[in-house]
Image (spheres, coloured by chain):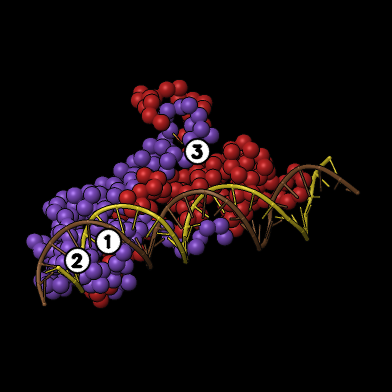
Chain colours: A purple, B red, C yellow, D brown
Amino acid sequence: MVSIKQLTMKVLTKNTDYAVRALLALAKAKGSYLSAKAIATEHDIPYQFLRRLLQEMIRHNLIISKEGAQGGFMIKKDPDEITVTQLIEIFQGKVQVSECMFRKQICGNRARCVLRHEIMRIENVVQNEFEKVTIGKLLRDLEGTHQAAPSISTPESAE
Amino acid sequence: MVSIKQLTMKVLTKNTDYAVRALLALAKAKGSYLSAKAIATEHDIPYQFLRRLLQEMIRHNLIISKEGAQGGFMIKKDPDEITVTQLIEIFQGKVQVSECMFRKQICGNRARCVLRHEIMRIENVVQNEFEKVTIGKLLRDLEGTHQAAPSISTPESAE
DNA sequence: TTTAACTGATACTATATTGGTATCAATTAA
DNA sequence: TTAATTGATACCAATATAGTATCAGTTAAA
Ligand code: FES
Ligand code: FES
């Protein structure tokens, strides 16, 4: 075996995972401040880890904060304008399929490379797909799940 | 900054990169044995690293080997049947967008989850796209680049 | 006016993954 | 017999990911 350790390669890391969860909590609490501690305990996110993520999201103008007692964080940007793509880019950097495998070896100086085209095309597909998933959409799905929409045809017992 | 180190997250690792290069070399040399050393030097792949990859590919029936002096490796499987997806799975494990972010927190016991559907859909898209890229296709592109097809409309000076 | 509940900033540690090296035994052509 | 070569596997280094700790500053409220 060479490198098959986990059996899967993650495209979303904990950073993004936690950030999305936190944003959903903040979006739901829209208008009031939620403390990092509250979010952390309620959503099982390591406290200090979460704090860094929140600070990063402030820098990116997704949320704001209030210091001191009774302080906390509040969502700033419209949830429908926050895409998973953005979060991935903030916390994991741009998704790139390959910096260009083979480079010199195969392509030499030639600018034309079908493989590269394939790769770039795939990259765009991924990008576009994630672009469609916003915090607002997830929130609505989530609330739909817990409130209305009693049951959907295919129950999908998987997972 | 939280984790933006490289600015990009790779979907293809060196393993896969090198494996594809080696397979292209072997596909080109179809019918004769190429030594690991020859491949390594010709394609700038770390020798010992490459040897492990080759052994792994033997285990997966992509290539065969001959021991001893004048030995080496020879491609076994039809290049058109070797997809990049397969190589990714061998060397990086299955591509999985997320093992299921949020899990309990959000979905609880509910089997219905739109986010999960989105994620799975994206996974499938990636999988399908890579499925289309085979060693055979790459080899033909490569040979086209070096032999016929003198020039294509868009030169793409990028990279 | 002191204190406890907070965030800001940042350094640190631990673990996992990725990338690469080294070693030695076994095989085979010359 | 020897040099070229693979089989097998252990090891090491660099980087990325995940998580922890600390301390200074702010603020609501007792
Ligand atoms: S492999 Fe780099 S341009 Fe083709
Ligand atoms: S997040 Fe896991 S099923 Fe929805």
* For the residues bearing labels 3 and 2, Cβ distance under 8 angstroms: no
Q: Chain of mark 1?
A: A
**Tag 1 and tag 2, C-beta contact below 8 Å:** no
Q: Which residue is mark 1?
A: A51
- Label count reads 3
Mark 3 lies on a secondary structure that is loop
Q: Nearer the viewer, mark 3 or mark 2?
A: 2
Q: Residue at x 44, y 39 (%)?
A: A100
Query: Would residue A127 appear left or right of A34 to someone viewing this image?
Result: right
**Residue B146: image location, x then y, percent:** 51, 27
Crowding at dot 1, Cα within 10 Å, few <14 / some 14-19 / many 20+, comes out as: some
- Residue A137 seen by the camera: no
- Place of residue A69 in the rendered image (x, y in percent of width and height, measured from the top left): 16, 67
Q: CA distance from mark 1 to mark 2?
A: 10 Å
Q: Amino acid at mark 1?
A: Arg
The CB of the residue at mark 1 lies under 8 Å from ligand 2: no
Q: Name the residue that disc number 3 marks.
A: A102
Q: Residue at x 41, y 49 (%)?
A: B11
Q: In the picture provided, is B128 more to the left or to the right than D28?
A: right
Label 1 – label 3 distance at C-alpha:
40 Å
Q: Residues within 10 Å of mark 3 (few under 14, many from 20)?
A: some
Q: Residue A35's mark?
A: 2
The residue at label 3 has a CB less than 8 Å from ligand 1: yes
The disc numbered 2 marks a residue on which chain? Answer: A
Q: Secondary structure at mark 2?
A: loop
